């Protein structure tokens, strides 16, 4: 066995320091790259991992060979090129493994230990493969203990490097991070250097004299040192330059991101960013206020946690084009959805969701801008109510009725079924409204609407058209079904209605038409039902009737009368006739009542019973009534100027006249313009006028202060309280002719007349009986001390020219 002499060596201190510096610089550069790796995604991340692996691997490898070159021996040492190149592979592989591990969100202990073992294997392999590349006239022997220690140091260095790089990565963006990176780089560089020099210490070199020189495949120490130094400087320079440039861009990007984030955080809308798996990645303050989840609670959770279960499919369908990266969606293309959101406390709210998507490194992302539209929906609902619902009763108005009627007609055309229209008007509503006031009238309409809805089916529509008019739409009905429902409505309203603590009765008049029999369009159907309703009114009210074709004649006459009323005053078609009022005891004429007559140019003489209610309904009673008042005053003054005996002239005042503003001024002006003294004018007021006591007291007292006479006309035909008889300044009561006419045949009428006369006298009022037609009636009234009478027994109403003759011939 040959005896080999040990070869001693020494270290070049300059190269040793250089070998210590290089891994520190490489480690610092790698830590910088680790932060970029953490922030990057997809291909960009892989690029930074590759660059980092090259930087760190070449740093470890360069440190190893520079340190080996720092070791000087008294023999010639060269290196095998191919083995040198092969030794680079384990260093870069170990570095790549380290950077790949820290790129993960979490660093588990078991994974860290396994990775450190593999990294240590790579570093140890790099070191000892590099040692094997040495070509010299000596052999190398290793101390097993130090060899094992070098491997252990490699493991500890690898594990330390992993945790240090992970720690720096997690603290990216914090202040003074460079200090932590510098300390970490020193530790990592020292650990790698320690492993190398421990490995070198484990090797001993022994001289041998029979080995030849290296061939052409060797490199000289000088060339290798220059190559390694220049190569490492280039690599580190490139790394530092790239990280510097990237940091500048990143700084600008961070500034832009901060501004962008500031805008997002200041937005009142919720702005949420999510990835291709619909996982929330960004959650602004607006989202926190809207949904109740903090940013920490929301990040990493599925986006559909903000959506109620019943809307999740709609939400998913809205996201699908972005998740699938459909080609028709250009970058930034958006769409808008309206659905409901779900808050943390479980409450739901309407929201508007604007979606936009983009692609980042091959992966789709999308943003959701969410606006709470609760107030907008409330406003829309309110607007819809204003457009389609009656504000008083909440029933559909004419607009909504027309929409539903059109839809029902379309369905009826397909199915062959009939549609029913009920036109309903409340009897005596105007009297109640005038008597008790509009507030009570409104409350009554609300109660009526409730009752009507209870009388029909769910698919039927009860609509208020205005005033006291209602229309009921009955789709898919029949004549028998409409009859049954009309009878149910009449039965329901046969019971009293309690409104505001006051009991009252109101009855409906119902006209009905059927589609398609009574009209093939909306307007015709409603018009024909309205026509049938007026026929019910004419025949006594509180009933129902189906439309028939002959009813159009009635409607046509009514329309002609209404048109004629508007022209009648202008064309002087109205005249006033006068009926005497006789003092029963003396038989003398003490006054006359002015009664309106209308001679229509085509229809002839129109009965007041026909045109007066129409004038009341249309409001034409006000100008007509003022004309009658002025004409009566003028005529009475003319009689007085003709030396006829002075007498009062009685004029009927309608409810609408009495309630108009300035009525007292109208009366005063008529007296002043005609020159008639107020004591010769008597105003006959109906019971409905004086029911509104607050208004009536003031008006009546003003009239009395002027010197007029006031009487209550048609007394006993109303439903009002008698308390007004002691409150109002009236002079007389007029017994309605319906009581006088049957005075001798009906004991109840006789009793009523007797009672009214006694009551009036007890209150200090005079009594006038209307409708006296026989001597027997007159004698009865005389025996009961009735003061005055008028009727056909004395005279029918006559033109003013006949009054002179009549005054001379009338006697009791």
Image (cartoon, rainbow, N blue to C red):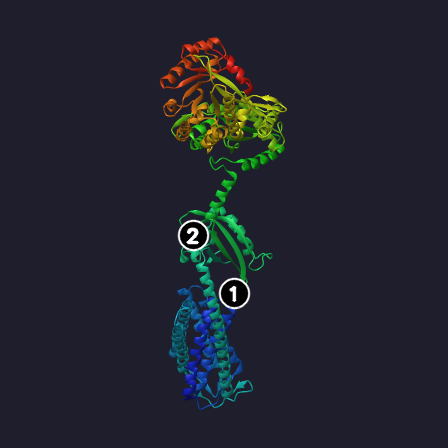
* Placement of 803 over or under 74, stated as above or below: above
**Residue 42: image tag:** 1
Q: Nearer the viewer, mark 1 or mark 2?
A: 2
In this orientation, does residue 692 appear?
Answer: no
- Mark 1 and mark 2 lie on one chain; the one further toward the N terminus is 1
Front residue of 188 and 681: 681
Q: Are marks 1 and 2 in contact (CB under 8 Å)?
A: no
In this orientation, does residue 749 appear?
Answer: yes
Q: Marks 1 and 2, Cα distance to the nearest angstrom?
A: 32 Å
**Residue 795 screen position, x and y as percent:** 52, 14
* Placement of 198 over or under 389, stated as above or below: below
- Circle 1 sits in a helix, a strand or a loop, which is it? helix
Front residue of 476 and 404: 404
Front residue of 318 and 155: 318
**Residue 213: image tag:** none
**Residue 609 screen position, x and y as percent:** 54, 21
**Residue 802 screen position, x and y as percent:** 55, 17
**Residue 489 screen position, x and y as percent:** 49, 25
Tell me which residue sits at (50%, 51%) in the image.
352
**Residue 291: image tag:** 2
Total residue callouts: 2
Number of other residues with Cα within 10 Å of mark 1, as a class: few under 14, some 14 to 19, many 20 or more: few
Front residue of 679 and 558: 679
In the rendered view of the protein, which quadrant contains the N terminus? Answer: bottom left
* Placement of 400 over or under 518, stated as above or below: below
- Circle 2 sits in a helix, a strand or a loop, which is it? helix
Number of other residues with Cα within 10 Å of mark 2, as a class: few under 14, some 14 to 19, many 20 or more: many
Tell me which residue sits at (52%, 68%) in the image.
44
């Amino acid at each position: 066995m040959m005896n080999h002499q040990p070869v001693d060596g020494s270290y070049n201190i300059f190269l040793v320091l250089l070998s210590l510096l290089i891994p520190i610089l490489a480690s610092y550069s790698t830590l910088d790259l680790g932060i970029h790796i953490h922030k990057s995604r997809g291909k960009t991340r892989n690029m930074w991992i590759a660059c980092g692996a090259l930087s760190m691997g070449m740093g470890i490898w360069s440190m190893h060979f520079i340190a080996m070159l720092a070791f000087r021996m008294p023999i010639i040492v060269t290196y095998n090129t191919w083995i040198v190149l092969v030794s680079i592979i384990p260093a870069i592989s170990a570095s790549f493994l380290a950077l790949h591990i820290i790129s993960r969100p979490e660093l588990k202990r078991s994974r860290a230990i396994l990775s450190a073992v593999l990294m240590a294997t790579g570093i140890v392999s790099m070191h000892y493969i590099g040692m094997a590349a040495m070509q010299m006239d000596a052999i190398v022997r290793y101390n097993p203990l130090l060899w094992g220690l070098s491997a252990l140091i490699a493991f500890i260095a690898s594990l330390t490097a992993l945790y240090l790089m992970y720690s720096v990565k997690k603290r990216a963006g914090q202040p003074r991070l460079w200090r932590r990176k510098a300390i970490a780089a020193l530790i990592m560089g020292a650990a790698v250097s320690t492993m190398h020099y421990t490995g070198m210490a484990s090797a001993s070199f022994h001289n041998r004299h029979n080995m030849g020189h290296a061939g052409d495949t060797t490199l000289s120490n000088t060339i290798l040192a220059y190559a390694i130094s220049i190569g490492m400087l280039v690599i580190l320079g490139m790394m530092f330059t790239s990280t510097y440039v990237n940091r500048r861009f990143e700084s600008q990007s961070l500034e832009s991101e901060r501004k962008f984030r500031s805008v997002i955080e200041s937005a009142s809308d919720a702005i949420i960013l999510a990835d291709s798996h619909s996982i929330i990645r960004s959650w602004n303050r607006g989202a926190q206020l809207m949904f109740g989840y903090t940013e920490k609670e929301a990040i990493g959770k599925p986006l559909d946690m903000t959506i109620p279960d019943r809307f999740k499919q709609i939400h998913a369908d809205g996201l699908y084009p972005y998740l699938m990266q459909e080609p028709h969606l250009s970058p930034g293309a958006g769409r808008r959805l309206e659905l409901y959101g779900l808050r943390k406390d479980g409450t739901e709210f309407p929201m508007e969701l604007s979606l936009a998507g983009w692609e980042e490194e091959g992966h789709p992302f999308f943003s959701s801008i969410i606006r709470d539209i609760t107030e907008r929906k409330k406003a829309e609902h309110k607007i819809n109510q204003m457009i389609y619902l009656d504000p008083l009763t909440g029933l559909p108005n004419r607009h909504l009725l027309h929409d539903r009627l059109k839809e029902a007609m379309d369905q009826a055309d397909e199915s062959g079924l009939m549609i029913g229209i009920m036109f309903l008007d409340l009897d005596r509503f105007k009297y109640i409204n005038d008597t008790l006031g509009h507030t009570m009238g409104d409350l009554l309409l609300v109660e009526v609407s409730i009752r009507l809805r209870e009388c029909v089916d769910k698919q039927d529509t009860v609509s208020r058209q205005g005033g006291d008019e209602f229309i009921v739409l009955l789709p898919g009905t029949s004549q028998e079904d409409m009859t049954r429902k009309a009878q149910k409505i009449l039965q329901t309203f046969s019971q009293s209605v309690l409104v505001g603590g006051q009991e009252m009765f109101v009855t409906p008049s119902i006209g009905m038409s059927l589609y398609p029999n009574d009209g093939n369009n909306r307007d015709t159907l409603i018009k024909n039902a309205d026509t049938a309703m007026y026929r019910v009114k004419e025949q006594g009210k509180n009933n129902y009737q189906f439309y028939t074709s002959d009813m159009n004649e009635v409607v046509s006459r009514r329309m002609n009368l209404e048109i004629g009323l508007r022209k009648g005053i202008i064309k002087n078609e109205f005249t006033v006739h006068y009926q005497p009022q006789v003092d029963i005891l003396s038989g003398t004429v003490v006054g006359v009542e002015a009664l309106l007559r209308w001679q229509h140019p085509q229809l002839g003489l129109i009965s007041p019973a026909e045109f007066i209610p129409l004038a009341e309904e249309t409001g034409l009673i006000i100008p007509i009534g003022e004309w009658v008042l002025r004409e009566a005053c003028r005529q009475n003054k003319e009689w007085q100027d003709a030396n006829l005996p002075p007498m009062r002239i009685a004029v009927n005042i309608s409810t609408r006249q009495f309630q108009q503003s300035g009525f007292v001024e109208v009366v005063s002006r008529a007296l002043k313009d005609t020159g008639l003294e107020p004591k010769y004018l008597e105003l006959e007021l109906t019971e409905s006028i004086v029911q509104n006591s607050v208004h009536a007291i003031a008006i009546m007292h003003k009239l009395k202060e002027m010197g007029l006479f006031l009487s209550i006309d048609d007394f006993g035909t109303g439903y009002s309280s008698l308390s007004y008889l002691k409150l109002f300044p009236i002079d007389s009561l007029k017994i309605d002719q319906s009581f006088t006419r049957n005075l001798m045949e009906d004991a109840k009428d006789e009793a009523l007349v007797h009672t009214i006369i006694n009551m009036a006298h007890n209150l200090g009022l005079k009594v006038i009986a209307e409708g006296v037609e026989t001597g027997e009636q007159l004698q009865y009234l005389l025996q009961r001390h009735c003061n005055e009478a008028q009727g056909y027994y004395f005279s029918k109403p006559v033109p003013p020219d006949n009054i002179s003759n009549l005054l001379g011939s009338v006697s009791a």
